[in-house]
């Protein structure tokens, strides 16, 4: 009682604590733990890849793994882009030649639609989805439909199937070769960047700003050209007096 009042530990409690410590640090318990550790290591070695990843893994290793995966995807994309570009370019060139060389005018319009779709595919390889959508909706959809409608109406008015005859194949081939040589010369002399410029943000907004700021003069000239073509069509379509 004196010891309790004085704040000293009771003898019985002290004895129980000594016994518990003795059991924890006994040689038998240590031997059991030491013998169980190699067994657990052997089981882990046999399981191999079946171990669960640690929740406390190094963040740097996780970032490196994600970086390697992203780099692999970018390398696969870079390797596929030239194949897609040259394949679409071959389709575009073949369909353009078919437009000029085909005698059936309706088939020529179908090849024109294929060429326009190939151009939209090239826009997709350049990550210009908006231009590809405009190309398909406006040109491959609208313009080709108008041309087909004009062919059908003209055949009904004439009463005979219209065929196109290329009378100036040699001259057209020479002019095309000269134009191609000029384009190749300018492209080879122009300083090309090592990598394409990266446009951050909305690409459609960037296109709108570029058209109405930097390229506003060609845009207005194109509008004047369309107006002149519309006035010419109205003039030639008016009835003879």
Image (cartoon, rainbow, N blue to C red):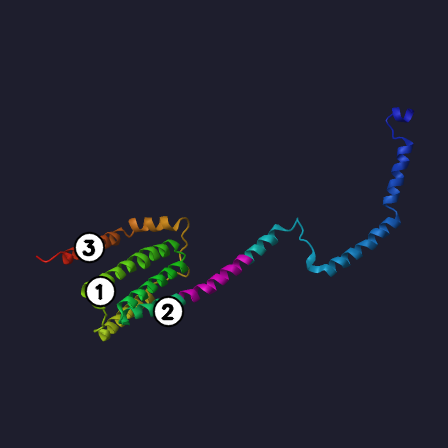
SS at mark 3 in the image: helix
Residue in the foreground of this view, choosing between 124 and 8: 124
Tag 2 residue: 90
SS majority, magenta: helix
Tag 1 residue: 155
Q: Is residue 213 visible?
A: no
Provide residue 8's location: percent of width, then percent of height: 87, 29
Provide residue 228's location: percent of width, then percent of height: 18, 55
Q: Residue at x 80, y 57 (%)?
A: 39
* Magenta stretch in the rendered image: 69-85
Which label's residue is closer to the chain start, 2 or 3? 2
Residue in the foreground of this view, choosing between 171 and 8: 171
As measured in the structure, the alpha-carbon distance from the residue carrying label 2 to the one carrying label 1 is 33 Å
Which label's residue is closer to the chain start, 2 or 1? 2
Callout 3 environment at 10 Å: few (<14), some (14 to 19), or many (20+)? few
Does residue 71 belong to the magenta stretch?
Answer: yes
Q: Residue at x 19, y 57 (%)?
A: 229
As measured in the structure, the alpha-carbon distance from the residue carrying label 3 to the one carrying label 1 is 22 Å
| On screen, residue 177 above or below 17 | below
Provide residue 161's location: percent of width, then percent of height: 23, 68
Describe residue 6's horizontal placement relative to residue 41 as left or right. right
Tag 3 residue: 230
- Asked whether disc 2 touches disc 1, contact meaning CB atoms under 8 Å apart, the reply is no
The quarter of the picture where the C terminus appears is bottom left
Provide residue 52's location: percent of width, then percent of height: 68, 53
| On screen, residue 185 above or below 4 | below
Q: Residue at x 40, y 49 (%)?
A: 202
SS at mark 1 in the image: helix
């Amino acid at each position: 009682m004196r010891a309790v009042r004085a704040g000293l530990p009771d003898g019985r409690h002290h004895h129980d604590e000594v016994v518990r410590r003795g059991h924890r640090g006994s040689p038998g318990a240590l031997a059991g733990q030491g013998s169980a550790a190699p067994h657990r290591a052997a089981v882990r070695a046999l399981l191999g890849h079946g171990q669960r990843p640690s929740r406390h893994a190094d963040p740097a290793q996780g970032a490196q793994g994600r970086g390697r995966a992203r780099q692999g995807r970018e390398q696969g994309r870079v390797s596929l882009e030239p194949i897609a570009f040259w394949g679409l370019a071959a389709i575009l060139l073949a369909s353009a030649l078919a437009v000029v060389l085909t005698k059936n005018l309706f088939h020529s319009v179908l090849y024109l639609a294929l060429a326009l779709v190939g151009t939209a595919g090239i826009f997709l390889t350049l990550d210009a989805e908006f231009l590809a959508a405009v190309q398909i909706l406006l040109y491959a959809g609208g313009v080709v439909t108008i041309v087909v409608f004009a062919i059908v109406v003209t055949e009904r008015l004439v009463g005979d199937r219209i065929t196109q005859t290329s009378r100036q194949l040699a001259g057209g081939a020479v002019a095309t070769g000269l134009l191609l040589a000029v384009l190749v010369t300018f492209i080879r002399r122009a300083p090309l960047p090592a990598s394409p410029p990266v446009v951050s943000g909305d690409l459609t907004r960037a296109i709108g700003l570029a058209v109405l700021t930097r390229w506003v003069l060609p845009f207005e000239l194109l509008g004047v050209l369309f107006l002149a073509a519309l006035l010419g069509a109205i003039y030639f379509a008016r009835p003879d007096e």
